[in-house]
Image: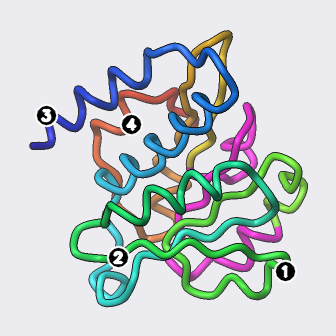
């Protein structure tokens, strides 16, 4: 099953992003597939799988659509929007919209001990502490990833996910 998912992710990774809507759909699929290659502590598997957004982004609507038909393991996906970083709580994933990238350090501080995967959009943000950052290069969607940033949040990441992305130390 993991091989099939890896092949799907590879296919998506090298697909072109020919329109804005298509790019957002691909980002949504990427984020959902990331959940298959990250292991959260057992205590985080007992409730709904929360994906929190800081700032406004078209990804929110796409993720809400996905959450209606998909689960992460046995967990229902709940999508939440936060205007205040202090309200984030125990989210599994926090996605920082591009217009809120300047708040990355605040989000990292607020979620440091909460086993939260922090996802951003844009080159260079993994070097600033993000776990994964989605990047459009030319007309292709890819991502930067940092194993050390993920492990610092007491999460485990599959080598498959690391191999498919641009690893940043």
Marks 2/4: CA distance? 26 Å
Mark 1 or mark 4, whichever is nearer to me: 1
Q: Specify start and end residues of the magenta stretch as a single range.
A: 106-131
Helix, strand or loop at label 2? It is strand
Marks 3/1: CA distance? 39 Å
Marks 2/3: CA distance? 24 Å
Which residue is drawn at the image coordinates 84% and 75% (left, top)?
A: 83
- Is 61 within the magenta? no
Which residue is drawn at the image coordinates 79% and 86% (left, top)?
A: 86
Marks 4/3: CA distance? 14 Å
- Is 111 within the magenta? yes
Marks 2/1: CA distance? 24 Å
Read off the residue under disc 1: 84
Mark 2 or mark 1, which has the lower sequence index? 2
Mark 2 or mark 3, whichever is nearer to me: 2
Which residue is drawn at the image coordinates 73% and 42% (left, top)?
A: 125
Residue 3 tag number: 3
Residue 123 as seen in the image, left or right of residue 89: right
Mark 4 or mark 3, which has the lower sequence index? 3
Mark 4 or mark 3, whichever is nearer to me: 3
Mark 2 or mark 3, which has the lower sequence index? 3
Which residue is drawn at the image coordinates 45% and 60% (left, top)?
A: 151
Colouring mode (rainbow / by chain / secondary structure / one colour)? rainbow
- Up the image or down, 125 lies above or below 131; here it is above
Read off the residue under disc 4: 162
Residue 44: x %, y % from top left: 37, 83
Helix, strand or loop at label 4? It is helix
Read off the residue under disc 2: 76
């Amino acid at each position: 099953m993991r091989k099939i998912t890896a092949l799907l992710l590879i296919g998506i990774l090298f697909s072109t992003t020919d329109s804005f809507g298509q790019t957002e759909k691909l980002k949504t699929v990427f984020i959902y597939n990331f959940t298959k290659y990250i292991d959260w502590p057992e205590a985080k598997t007992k409730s709904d799988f929360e994906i929190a957004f800081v700032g406004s982004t078209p990804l929110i609507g796409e993720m809400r659509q996905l959450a209606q038909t998909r689960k992460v393991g046995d967990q229902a996906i709940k999508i939440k929007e936060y205007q205040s970083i202090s309200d984030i709580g125990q989210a599994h994933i926090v996605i920082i919209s591009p217009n809120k990238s300047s708040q990355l350090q605040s989000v990292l501080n607020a979620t440091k001990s909460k086993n939260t995967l922090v996802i951003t959009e844009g080159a260079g943000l993994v070097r600033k502490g993000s776990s994964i950052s989605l990047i459009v290069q030319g007309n292709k969607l890819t991502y930067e990833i940092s194993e050390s940033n993920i492990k610092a949040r007491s999460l485990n990441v599959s080598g498959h996910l690391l191999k498919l992305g641009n690893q940043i130390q």
